[in-house]
Image: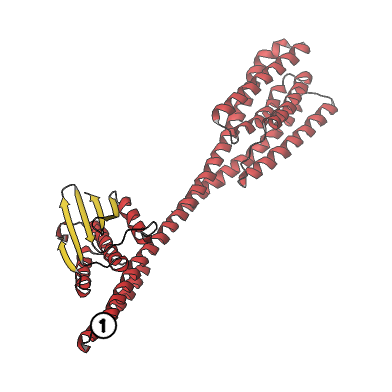
Amino acid sequence: MSETAAIEPIRRTTRFMLLFTEILILMPIFFLLQEPRHWAVLVAVGLVTVVLVVVRVRGTLGRLRGDWVPYPNVRVFSLVGVALAVVSVAAATGPLSSPFTSVLVGMTASEFFVARTLKVATGYAALVLLLQAVVFTSVLLLVGRADFIGPSLFGTTFVAASLMYSVGLTYRWWDGVLKLEEARRDAAELAATRERLRLAEDLHDILGHALEVVSLKSELAVRLTDPDKSKAEMIEVQRLARSALKDVRALAHGNRPTDFATELTGARNLLDSAGISCDFDADPADLTTAERDLFGRVLREAVTNALRHSDPRTCKVSLVTKPDQALLRIVNDGVAPLRQGDEGSGLAGLTRRVEASGGSFTARNVDPASFEVIASLPR
């Protein structure tokens, strides 16, 4: 099951829960009809209830669309004040059914749970419950129904607190669903970006190395006076071009391997043909598959940079394998002082690759007029 398919049932269920809770605001009207009241009281309570329903539904629909901006405290307390006014009227005209009007208080106070910390929201909720208790007690004392204070306080507090937390925590649940979906999209975009970066680095490795070798051998073929040797170099150029094309196609299909032993042989042949003295002390037999792949990339980039950015006469490659570490070192001479920004994207890409594998990578100028590349991988 995809991540989108897994999130969709949660989204659908939470949306239904939030919209269903809005129906609860209509409940006080049915309970108020159980006791005889003046029609003006019922009309006033009905109008206030309609206003609160409209405000609540608009806010809920906005949050379902992702508009997670909280109401200011002043606005929420104003809505709570309107709900408490209804509670006062209901308590004064019918103590038996009035506790059910605390539904309005609980629903409006649930707004405090939107985009606020649970600690802050709980503090505001406690304040609202205290205000409601004071209002109920005061009204019942004024109308001479002190015998209803105990049951009324229990009922109103229970109803209001239950709705505050149930609706408020449903809001927070919906907020979590939105953040989860946003995190899923961000992860997908990050994965796509990483894949594009990997392809760009691989393409740089393939074409940068191949074009550098083709340029070198073409130049060598032009300088040679022996037609047979010149022809042999051009045949090698043709082979290299076809090999690069094959590598690009393999890269596009995601099945292009890199092997340190193969790169080692290629580097030796290339440097020999360029007249560069080679000193290779590297046995790939003890390397793991991952190490052979990564060290192969490092060697290829180091040799390419040596031919492109310097005029080397010697190149030394050494590989040391230990139970806890594998270390590759490539050094070439004939290097001018490295300027800021000369490192190029190839070395930067290698740094990311090696460090992502838990290793370390350095590329720097060393005396006398040499350049050193060191890649180390833990085992």
Q: Amino acid at mark 1?
A: Arg
Comparing 193 with 140, the one in front is 193
Q: Residue 125 occupies which quadrant of the picture?
A: top right
**Residue 113 relative to residue 256: left or right:** right
The x and y percentages for residue 252 are 37, 69
Q: Residue sitting at 45 percent across and 51 percent down? A: 187
Q: Secondary structure at mark 1?
A: helix
Read off the residue under disc 1: 223
**Residue 59 relative to residue 229: left or right:** right
Can I make out residue 363 in this image?
A: yes
Q: Residue 215 occupies which quadrant of the picture?
A: bottom left
Comparing 131 with 189, the one in front is 189
Look at the picture and state if 4 lies above or below 248.
Answer: above
**How many labels sit on residues?**
1
The x and y percentages for residue 324 are 18, 47
Q: Residue sitting at 73 percent across and 29 percent down? A: 78
Look at the picture and state if 113 lies above or below 378.
Answer: above
Label 1 crowd (10 A; few <14 / some 14-19 / many >=20): few
The x and y percentages for residue 200 are 40, 64
Q: Residue 316 occupies which quadrant of the picture?
A: bottom left
The x and y percentages for residue 342 are 37, 60
Look at the picture and state if 339 lies above or below 151.
Answer: below
